[in-house]
Amino acid sequence: MAAEEKSRILVVGGTGCLGRHVVAESARLGHPTLALVRDTAPSDPAKAHLLKSFQDTGGVTLLKGNLDDNGSVVSAIRLADVVFSTVGVRQIPYQTKLVAAIKEAGNVKRFLPSEFGLDADRSEAVEPTRSMITVTKAAIRRAVEAAGVPYTHVLAGYFFCYGLPGVGQVLAQAPPVDTAVILGDGVARVVFVDEANIAAYTVLAAGDPRAENKTLHIRPPANTLSHNELLALLEGKTGRALERVHVPEDAVLKQIHLAVNESV
Ligand SMILES: NC(=O)c1ccc[n+]([C@@H]2O[C@H](COP(=O)([O-])OP(=O)(O)OC[C@H]3O[C@@H](n4cnc5c(N)ncnc54)[C@H](OP(=O)(O)O)[C@@H]3O)[C@@H](O)[C@H]2O)c1
């Protein structure tokens, strides 16, 4: 495809865990890429290094902006054909501002809201995930539909960066050494997906007419594993058997309930 046929892609949330891969992949595929960032000259060395890596691709333009500043968002959108939102969990409700800005700008051919998890219209998540994530993502879907903006929802399983450091153990940052804690019986299967692969499919879906007003599910069969299977892979690599401690489902739900009550 000739360079002039490439969509101009705007990424809102491009410095995030997933967004940085989307910016890099968009540039790698030759799309003129715009990254709306709150701070174009951050004092944080890691963030400054990330922004420099974007600019070093030669295909990324940084635009200073903020979802709270409608003018900056509308101006950025007017330079793009496609808008990706990869804002984080806390910013999901504020995407109503982004939808309003897309409607005001009136030039966007495809919007990909910040989804990348469970299907918000079908998930049976318990609180607080239900209120924080699934209800708010579903509300953004309704706002997009009401605005008449062509969309694609990209759903992924469990990001590598969250699911793999602890080899499936929730909140653990390192693999188990002697004992693995398993929530429930460890039989339920989960799809583990590399953020760079999510980014690649997301950028491709944005330009694919078959994905307009559709949901793309990223489910590589070889990455679909139960916690028990994942731990067996680790045992095969290390040659060491792990003791398995199972936490029953009702105890997990009780712990979540207690944590929610303690945080309010
Ligand atoms: N399936 C999974 O395992 C999984 C795991 C995690 C996340 N997710 C989903 O993936 C999506 C992205 O999450 P993430 O964890 O990658 O996000 P993240 O790392 O929290 O990144 C948030 C991004 O939003 C930007 N941002 C924050 N406030 C903003 C504002 N007012 N205006 C403009 N930009 C703003 C941040 O910019 P600054 O650099 O300025 O702060 C940052 O780039 C979410 O929908 C989340 O639910 C899925």
Image (spheres, rainbow, N blue to C red):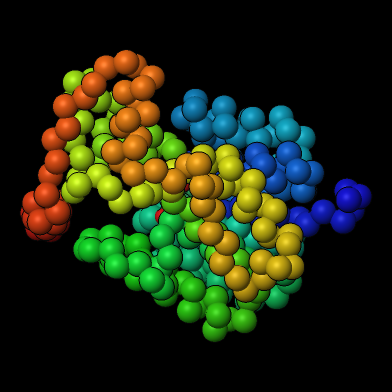
In the rendered view, does 234 fall on the left or right side of 152? left
In the rendered view, does 9 fall on the left or right side of 194? right
Q: Residue at x 38, y 19 (%)?
A: 237
Q: Residue 41 location in percent, x, y?
A: 57, 35
- Nearer to the camera, 35 or 204: 204
- 74 lies above or below 89: below
Q: Is residue 187 visible?
A: yes
Q: Residue at x 77, y 35 (%)?
A: 58
Q: Residue 204 location in percent, x, y?
A: 70, 53
Residue at the extreme top of the image, as rendered: 239
Q: Residue at x 50, y 58 (%)?
A: 155
- Nearer to the camera, 26 or 161: 161
> Which quadrant would residue 210 be assigned to in this image?
bottom right
Quarter of the image with the C terminus in it: bottom left
Q: Residue at x 88, y 50 (%)?
A: 1
> Which quadrant would residue 124 be assigned to in this image?
bottom left
> Which quadrant would residue 79 be assigned to in this image?
bottom right
- 80 lies above or below 227: below
- Nearer to the camera, 226 or 112: 226
Q: Residue 23 location in percent, x, y?
A: 63, 44
Q: Is residue 63 visible?
A: no
Q: Residue 122 location in percent, x, y?
A: 38, 71
